[in-house]
Image: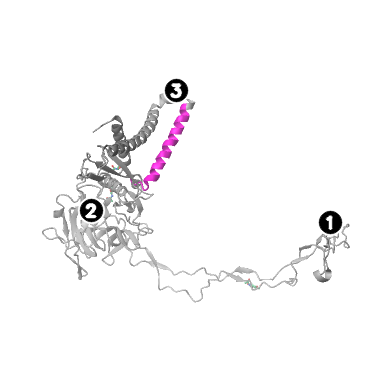
């Protein structure tokens, strides 16, 4: 064993270099901690940790009396891009099956003159081709729990709000449906939000938030960013409020209704002197021939320079004619026959048409009359939802492994935001780190409109590095310019930058030099050992680092070679992949 100064310095430099390169690959996955922030008394919050089993009851109901909810549910950790260790969620376990599960709220949720905030996480661990991932808030009125709080939750169970992603093929939306009782018909009606936003189809976790305020404004947020907002009372957003007036279907246009606004004046006749045949242009009668105009001078003359070639035989070669050119005489005065210029004919009238006049019989465009809507009922505050007694998932899906987590139903927007800050944001950041580390072909979650994701995802490490090098050089340039201009002020007032720039430059040079020192040192020791023992290569205790750029990712393979085993034993080589 020979430790020289250069060996140690190369190892240090290499570790420094690898830590720089691998800093992104060494994401520290956080471990689950129960949320410790404030949750109001009347709010419901589910993290799927202790005691979830007593709250969540899978349904064994039948849908349409034919199919039953055979889909299985589990509470388990994410199996792909698991951003938080030991963090469990509710997982859909069966492909192509109906699933239903519900939880009874500890207190009936009354939203009268209050804000409703519903928030939950969805993770499409195996992507979503066709299936629902929406949550339903169940109307307390229709719930029939047995003594064990068990509910035969089905499509028939009355709900108040249905919210969340639903996708099948190209049809992708985030539902926001409100079910209200129509007092006229005494039936429940579904009202869908118009122009619903699209659900986010990524393998990382997405956060869906619905907010309905007592002033009837609503917001749908995806990952904390508003994806749709409006008002329950605005007909552009919802058809919750029935029209006061409707068109009378029985109204028909009267036979004698005149819709022609203009008619030809029957009293208008063509004037006697109207000559339809008068030409548009006539020769100007007032024009006079210029005095120097020479009608005898031709406009073109044979080109005097164009001579008949020698040996031209008119009989054999055809009749020879010189090229004609503009007569240079005509540049000074007009030549050839003088013609009167044309002017617009003052007597021109064109085709006569009778004038149009307003039709005295005109009654305007006919429209059927409107009558009071017999189905109208007053609804002033649709955000005063029916009391909510439970919530759950009642979905059909082709794709299993949809994971739900951190379900919040409450009245406080700030509570939901604090939950998101404490649970969702760190989870997504961690998942995005894992996306970067894993195969670069994994679907990117970055979206330009998404501030949460922008910082987390660096879609192209190479571009990112180039950007930062460019930025560094730009900053350095300005600093150096300042130092040259005002050396004492700049260095005195901004010493930190001098330290930073020089450290980075020295560090970079040190890393590069250290790396090559290591390579050279290693090669030398291999050559040395070859000459020491020509049968078995001897490699000293050191590490070699190889940068693997095959996948575009900076991965490091550290090949540690154990203390050389001289003699017949082969070298033991362990390769560690980081
Ligand atoms: C609704 O709540 C607000 C604020 O708490 C209160 O000022 C208002 O009077 C309430 N309106 C009704 C109709 O209860
Ligand atoms: C045409 O002229 C007659 C007689 O002057 C007049 O009574 C009639 O109203 C005119 N018609 C229109 C369409 O102006
Ligand atoms: C959540 O985090 C963001 C960013 O740090 C912060 O601006 C916001 O105030 C936080 N929200 C709450 C309710 O704490």
Ligand 3 quarter of the rendering: top left
Q: Give x and y (percent) for residue 286.
A: 83, 61
Q: Specify whether residue 469 is painted magenta.
A: yes
Q: Earlier in the sequence, mark 1 or mark 3?
A: 1
Q: The magenta stretch spans which residues? A: 456-483
- Pick out the residue farthest to the left: 147
Q: Which residue is drawn at 20% across and 71% down?
A: 66
Q: Tell me if mark 2 has few (under 14), some (14-19) or many (20+) residues whose alpha carbon lies within 10 angstroms of its own.
A: few
**In the image: residue 39, left or right of residue 168:** left
Confirm or reject: label 1 Cβ below 8 Å from ligand 2. Answer: no
Q: x, y percentage for residue 345?
A: 76, 65
Out of 574 and 335, give the one closest to the viewer.
574
Judging by the rendered image, the residue that carries numbered circle 1 is 328
| Cα–Cα span, label 1 and label 3 | 81 Å
Residue, disc 3: 488
Mark 1 vs mark 2, CA separation in Å: 96 Å
Q: Residue 79 carries which label?
A: 2
Q: Assign a secondary structure to mark 2.
A: loop
Crowd rating for badge 1 (residues with CA inside 10 Å; few <14, some 14–19, many 20+): few
Secondary structure beneath dot 1 equals helix
Colour scheme of the rendered structure: one colour
Of residues 406 and 492, the one nearer the viewer is: 492
The answer to whether mark 3 is within 8 Å of ligand 3 is no
Residue 26 bears which disc, if any? none
Is residue 148 found left or right of 321 in the rendered image? left
Q: Position of residue 36 (x, y in %)?
A: 20, 43
């Amino acid at each position: 064993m020979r430790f020289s100064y250069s060996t140690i310095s190369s190892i240090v430099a290499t570790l420094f270099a690898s830590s720089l390169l691998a800093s992104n690959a060494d994401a520290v996955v956080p471990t689950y901690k129960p949320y410790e922030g404030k949750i109001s008394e009347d709010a419901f919050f589910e993290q799927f940790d202790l005691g979830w089993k007593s709250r969540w009851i899978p349904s064994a109901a039948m849908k349409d009396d034919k199919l039953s909810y055979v889909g299985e549910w589990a509470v388990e950790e994410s199996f792909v891009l698991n951003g938080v260790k030991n963090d469990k969620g509710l997982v859909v376990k069966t492909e192509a099956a109906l699933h239903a599960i519900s939880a009874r709220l500890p207190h009936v949720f009354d939203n009268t003159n209050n804000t409703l905030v519903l928030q939950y996480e969805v993770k499409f661990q195996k992507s979503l081709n066709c299936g629902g991932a929406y949550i339903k808030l169940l109307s307390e009125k229709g719930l029939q729990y047995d003594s064990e709080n068990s509910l035969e939750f089905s499509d028939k169970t009355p709900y108040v709000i249905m919210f969340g992603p639903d996708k099948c093929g190209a049809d992708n939306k985030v539902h926001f449906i409100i079910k209200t009782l129509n007092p006229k018909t005494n039936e429940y009606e579904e009202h869908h939000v118009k122009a619903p936003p699209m659900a986010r189809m990524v393998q990382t976790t997405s956060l869906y938030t619905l907010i309905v305020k007592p002033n009837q404004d609503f917001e749908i947020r995806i990952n904390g960013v508003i994806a749709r907002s409006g008002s329950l009372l605005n007909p552009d957003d919802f058809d919750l409020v029935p029209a006061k007036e409707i068109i009378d279907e029985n109204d028909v246009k009267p036979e004698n209704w005149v819709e022609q606004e203009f008619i030809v004046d029957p009293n208008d006749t063509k004037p006697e002197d109207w000559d339809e045949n008068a030409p548009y242009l006539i020769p100007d009668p007032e024009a006079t021939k210029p005095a120097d105009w020479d009608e005898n001078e031709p406009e073109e003359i044979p080109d005097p320079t164009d001579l008949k070639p020698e040996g031209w035989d008119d009989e054999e070669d055809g009749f020879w004619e010189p090229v004609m050119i503009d007569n240079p005489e005509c540049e000074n005065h007009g030549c050839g026959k003088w013609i009167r210029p044309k002017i617009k004919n003052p007597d021109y009238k064109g085709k006569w048409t009778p004038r149009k006049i307003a039709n005295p019989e005109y009654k305007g465009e006919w429209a059927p009359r409107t009558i009071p809507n017999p189905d109208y009922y007053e609804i002033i505050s649709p955000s005063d939802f029916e009391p909510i007694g439970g919530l759950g998932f009642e979905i059909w899906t082709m794709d299993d492994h949809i994971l739900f987590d951190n379900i919040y139903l409450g009245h406080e927007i700030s509570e939901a935001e604090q939950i998101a800050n404490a649970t969702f944001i760190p989870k997504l950041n961690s998942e995005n780190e894992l996306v970067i580390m894993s195969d670069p072909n994994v679907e990117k979650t970055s979206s330009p409109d998404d501030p949460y994701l922008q910082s987390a995802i660096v879609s192209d490490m190479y571009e990112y590095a180039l950007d930062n090098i460019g930025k560094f050089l730009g900053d350095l340039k300005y600093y150096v310019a300042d130092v040259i201009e005002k050396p004492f002020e700049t260095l005195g007032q901004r010493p930190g930058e001098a330290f930073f720039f020089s450290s980075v430059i020295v560090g970079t040079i040190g890393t590069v030099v250290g790396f090559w020192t290591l390579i050279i040192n290693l090669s030398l020791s291999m050559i040395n050992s070859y000459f020491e023992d020509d049968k078995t290569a001897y490699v000293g205790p050191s590490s070699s680092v190889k940068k693997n750029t095959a996948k575009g990712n900076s991965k490091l393979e550290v090949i540690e070679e154990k203390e050389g085993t001289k003699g017949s034993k082969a070298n033991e080589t362990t390769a560690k992949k980081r």
